[in-house]
Every structure is written in C-alpha cells, then in structure tokens.
Image (cartoon, coloured by chain):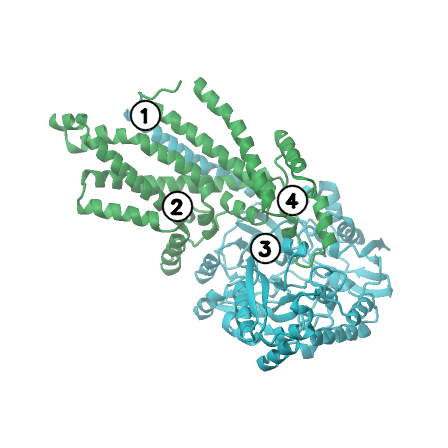
Amino acid sequence: MNYFLKRILEIIPVLLIITFIVFTLVFIAGDPVALLLPEDATTEDIAALQAALGLDDPFYVQYGRYVMNMLQGDFGTSFRYGEDAMLLVFERLPATLELAIASILVAIMIAIPLGIWSATKKNSSIDLVATGAAVLGKAMPNFWLGIMLILIFSVTYSIFPVSGRGSFAHLILPAITLGTGIAAEMTRLIRSSMLETLGQDYIRTAKSKGLRTGIVVYKHAFRNTLVPVVTIIALQTSTLIGGTLITETVFAWPGIGQLLIQAVNNRDMAIVQACVMVIAFFVIVMNLIADFLYQLLDPRIRYK
Amino acid sequence: MKRKIWMLGLLLMGLFLLGACSNDEEDGEKDKDTGETADIGGDERTLTIAVGSDMVTFDVHDHINTSTEAIHVNMFNYLVKRDNETGEILPDLAESFENIDDLTWEFKLKEGVTFHNGDELTSADVKYSLERVATGEELKDYPNYNQIKEVEILDDYRFRIITHEPEPVLLNRISRIASAILPSNYIEENGFDHFLQNPIGTGPFQFVEWVRDDRIVFEVYDDYFDGKNEEWDQLVFRVIPENSTRVSELLTGGADIAVNIPPADWDRVADHENTYLAQETSNRTLMIFLRSTEGYPTSDQRVREALDLAIDNQAIIDSLLGGAGVPTITRVAPGNFGYAEHLYDTYNYDLERAKELLAEAGFPDGFEMTLHSPRGRYLQDAEVAEMVAGMWAQIGVTANIEFMEWSNFVELRNANENEDAYLLGLGNSMFDAANALDWYSADRFEGETDYRNDEVEELLAAAMTNMDLEERNEQYIKAQELLAEDAAHIVLHMESINIGVSEELDYTPTMDEMIYVDTITRK
C-alpha cells in the first residue's frame, strides 16, 4: 500500500512542474491582449488593458502570483469569459468523460473478438481482413472519418443526428470515430499477445488433455493476454481525456478539447493551465489504476 | 480469475455510468432552474440557428465580439437603433431624443417597458448601464464609451447624456455593441455574478439556458414592449465550430439557419432543395496598408498608385469570392455616415499606367517588397494576398508574402516591425466615417505606416467634433477624395455575409452582421 501512497504523493511535484512548463510556453507564445481587443484598438488601449489584467508585470511576478493563487485553490480567471477557469473546465468534464468511455467501449467491442479471432485463425483470410482493417483504422485521420460518417449516416441516410450532445444517438458517431482508431491498435496488440500465449507449453498441455478449443482460447489463453490490454486501455483513456480535440470540434461536442483549442487560440492562460492540470491528473491516475489492475490480473506482480 | 475479469468489466461499466450520471445531474439542475430543457430542432415553433463560435459572455460591456452581440440583440435593447438600409437613427427604448447643446443630448424613454423580471425600465437603468462602460477601464468596450462624461437623471423617464467633447457621432455610438440597457435594480440586489448566470433584458426573447460550447436557449417574452413575437416560441443558438458540420446540420434540418458558410460550401447550400444562400454586403473592408516611411519605395505616391492600379479588384472577387463582394476605393460604405457614393462600387485598374508610374518613380524594373498577411481570419485572406502578389508581379514588383498567426501579426504591428505592406480586414460597428478614416491619422500610425496628409488631418480633426452634420458629411467626403488621389493605402473590397437558410424561411441578413430574430419569418 505504501507504494501507492508514494505514487499519489508524487502527483504534486509533477503537477507543479507541468504548470511551469505550460505557463512558460503560453507566455512565450504571445500577448493575449492583442486577441482581446479589436483591430482598431490603439496602442494606449492595449497598454491600459495589459495593466488592468496584470500582464505588464515580468514573467517571474506573473508566474509567482499564479502559483500562490493556485496553492489557495484559485486557478485564475479566464481572460475571455471573465469566469473561474477551473469551473469552466469542470463544466466540460462530464461530456469529455462520456465520450472517452464510450470510445473505449467501442474499441473493446471491436478489438477483443477481432484480435482473438485473427490470432486463432492465423494467416487465414479472416486474419488478413482483420489485419487490413486494423491498418486502415489506424491510417484514417479522425477528422476525415468523422466528416465521412456524418455525410453517410446523417446527411444521406438520416440515421444519427449530425452533431451536438444530448441523447444516446448523439454519442454513437463520435464514439465510433474515436473508437476505431484505438480498436486498430488494440486488435494488433491482442493478436500478437494471443499468438505468443497460444505457443506456450501449458496451452499445448491443455489441448492434449482434450479440452475444447473454445475453453483453451478463452479460459487459458485470453486471460493471460489481459495485462497488455489493460495497459493500452489505461493509456488510451488518459490520452482521450485530452486527445479528443479534433473529434469534439467536428461533432460540436462541448468537452474539454474544444475549450482547450479555443483557449490556446486566445492565449487564455488560466484555462489552458486548468485544462492541462486536469488532463495531467487523469493521465497520472489512470496509470496508477493500471498498475493496481496488474496486481489483480497477475498475482505474480507485486509492488514494494 | 473469472472473478477478476468480472471486476474489470464492472469497473468499466461503473466508469461509463459515472459519466452518464454526471450528465443527468447536470441536466437535472438545468431543469430546476429553467423549468424546461431545450428541444433542438424538433418543434416547428423553435428556431434553431447554427453559429460558428460560442457566445463570450452576458457582460454586454466586456466583449467586442460581433457574433456575441448578434445573439444579445434578441434579449437586450439599445436606446436607439440604426436603420441598416438608410443609416437613419430610429427610436428604440427611447421615445424621442434631441441635441440640447454641443455637449448635451436629452432623451425621453418609452413608458411601460419592462425587463424580463417585470421591473419597469427607468432613467436609473440608463445611468447605470452607460456610466458603467464609460468609466470601467477594465471593460473591453471602454475605449468606445469613455467619451461620455455622465448621465444626468431628470425624472423616471427623462435624462441627459453629457459628453466630454462635442460628440456628433453619439447616436451611432449608443446603437451598437455595449449599448444595451441593463436592469440596475436587479443587478444591485443580486450582484453582477448573479446577473451573468441569470441575465435579463428588455428584448423580445428571454434567457433560458446556456450550455457552453453547445447551445444558448431563449424563449419568447410575452410582455415585450414592441409586441410579442408571434412567429417563434423558442430560440436556440447551437455552437458548431466545424464548417462542414454546420452545413450538414442545415441540410438535414438540424438547424434552420447557419451562419458563416465558407465559399467552398456555397454551391452545396444554394443547390440543395431544402436550403438557399442569403448574401449581403458587410461593413468589413479588406485593405492593404502601405508604409510611407522614408526609405521605403511605397513612400512615393507614384509607387503606391502603381500598386493600386495593378490590382484587378473585380477579378479577385470573381475568382476567389464567387462574385460576392463589392470593389471599392473607400472604406466608408453605404449606410455609414460620410458615405462617398462616387468612390464606392468602383476601382482603378490600368497595368500600362502602373508601369509608367513605376518607371517615373525610378523603378523601371520593379522592386522587391514584403507583404504580411494573416491566414484564416478573413474570407479567403491568404488566397487574396497570393493573388495580389501575382498581380504585382505583372508590373515587375516581387512581393514576398509572410503569413502570420494572428497574435504575432498584431504584435508585429504594435512593435512597428511591419515592412512595406500588410493585409487587414476592418469592420466598423460605429457606421461612421470618423472610425473608418482614423486609420489615416498621422499621429496614431506614427512609426507603423507613417502616412501624413496635412489637409486630411485638418478635415478629420474638424469633422470629429463638428455638430453641423451637413458640413461634417462634406468634410469626410473631401477627405476621402484626397486619400484616393494620394493612394494612401489600397482598399480592395467589402466582404460579403454568407448565411445558409432553410427554404421554409424568409430571412435577409443585415450589413451589421446582427441576427434580428424578429425579422425571420416562416414562408
């Protein structure tokens, strides 16, 4: 247990380092005031707003102020919206989580049967089709796939709504868009992991005992491929929290991705920081959960 | 082992349910506040408008965002409104208004106007609203209102606006972004943060809910002073940033109106049986600013004129903008105060003359220059810059185009590091020549463009505070003629507003880019 406590405590310095990196990058990228005022703002207008927002202070003063406020639970106010940045991020979190989890479920539903199938029927036509589909799934860019799905299933056949968030039907196209890319990667991983397992001695023993192929594959082989699968699910889920930017924009999905893109475009420091903090937090926590699950799945793994 | 796989499955299910539950909770809370949820695009008495970016805030004084104001105009009112066709100022919340002396305007409010909570509109609300933006230095629209010194209340319905300097443009100033009249009692009692979460105004529609980056919902206000809107019960603005998705929503009926249709999708919208493309000239001008600083070739009037003559403005409009756009020599378009009719909807193009002028100026073989341009900020901006450079090549001028990300572009100009020329699109929500021509002011652009024309300076200074409107109009027309002769900067064209509309609706966009839902009707 001490191991996990240590890991949890490590989150604090990691997040602090991340704030410094992000703050520096946004600071270097440019002055937000240029984007807040119209084309015809005068130099005086710009200077006045910079002073009002405290943006005329040197870097270390601005960063110091940010960290002090953060330690008191104040993650700053959005320049653009004039509201508490962390609240804005939390408002979007359910939408992003919903999409991320649905995408992972889509990926699991595709990848597990497909991966097992192509491993057990190695080099057959099924394996060839599955491998081809995996390569294709990985090669298709999300924005293209999203737009194509909209054109086919919404514009031409009116089966699903075009965009937005609301009902279960709204979730399907974006989840497929994100899910197929992950499924492609997962299928290949499951296939190779299964192949390795199927070549093990104990599988041969099980087969020679006269057990049915189904039992050998699902009971003896599949459970042993789960460790790499859990790793990839954990990694992909954490990536999805911050990596749904393009899909969220294509489907007008009101999640963190859209918020972050706009915040970066507007140099909205507080929101960028808050988004990155939340995303980083998820990445760390998901890794922790994955480590925890390893223990559960494979009794040989023990953390000290 | 079986138990562990089950646990993994349960964990995943739990995570999924967690996501779904938090969503339900959020919606549930909205239900409590508003009593209803939004039905997107379903009901035929619901008007759904797809917009490209989310509203910024309900703080009417703290944004300079045209698309935000386009939504606000349906729930707030100004004291006066500007007729988009004629430019005439008409009463809105104010019943009448008159100019008392150079610094004083007197207004009388309509009686019986109510805010959405039932409070009656009085002079105190006007004083609160205008003085907040006129004195709040941290507010983004402060530079456009600090000309107002104070609002003096005479009685509940009568008040005076007193300005620091004579303000011939005051009525235009208070009929645009940040001119909305806010409920002072409601804000004082509940605080401004409460107002931001639960905004009320005097307009035809009242606020229901705002799900950020998703939708803003309004419902009709029964007691609207100008008569309840009988066409629509509910109004939904849906935020759809991706152009092709916005167009798809329009084509499938998920939206009744979609704004900012990009040129690539114009045919798709116009040719579809359920939709049509409504276009109108906007008040945004695309221009190329030239440096008149000594040492630059463009400091010579003949070179500037040659660069202008080498550009075929209509060819740009036809090939890049599908014919939508108006070529012009001045920024001051119809509907603006100071409009110079003979300089609008026309352009100068003469390649031979351009070559002659260059030779006279000492550049018979042309020269090399730099053109800075933003990319993706205005309609086809990068393509326009490339086409202009191609046209200049015909007279021997090599323009190296440097495309820049917007904030870096602004910083470059602020630091006066711009070179021979830069491309810029300028809107003018004031609809007055003073704003349009301020870009030729020598003091303001010292170090950036360094253009100076003393005669123009005098005319602009005199017109700025001239309360004799007829004379003021002439001063601006004269200034525009002088600037055209001098080829101070190159004016390319007025951009078009491009809106996709359902075939079932009647809608004509307006030059100010606002979306007045009162003008949208079913056929």
Furthest-right residue in this view: B101
Mark number, residue A82: 4
Sooner in the amino-acid sequence: mark 1 or mark 4: 4
Is residue B445 shown to the viewer in this render? yes
Tag 2–tag 4 contact (CB < 8 Å): no
Q: Is residue B166 left or right of residue B113?
A: right
Q: Label 2 is found on which chain of the structure?
A: A
Give how far apart the Cα atoms at labels 3 and 1 are. Answer: 52 Å
For the residues carrying marks 2 and 3, which lies nearer the camera in this image? 3
Q: Helix, strand or loop at disc 4?
A: loop
Does the residue at mark 1 contact the one at mark 4 (Cβ under 8 Å)? Answer: no
Mark 2 and mark 1: Cα distance apart in space: 27 Å
| Spatial CA span between label 1 and label 4 | 47 Å
Residue under numbered circle 1: A297
Q: Judge if badges 1 and 4 mark residues of a common chain.
A: yes
- State yes or no: discs 4 and 3 in contact (Cβ < 8 Å): no
Task: Give the cyan chain's letter.
Answer: B
Number of numbered discs on residues:
4
Same chain for labels 2 and 3? Say yes or no: no
Q: Which structural element holds mark 1?
A: helix
The chain painted green is A
Residue located beneath label 2 in the image: A178
| CB within 8 Å, label 3 to label 1 | no
Closer to the camera in the image, A198 or B135: A198
State the mark number for residue B26: none
Chain letter for the residue marked with disc 3 in the picture: B
Q: Position of residue B50 (x, y in %)?
A: 52, 57
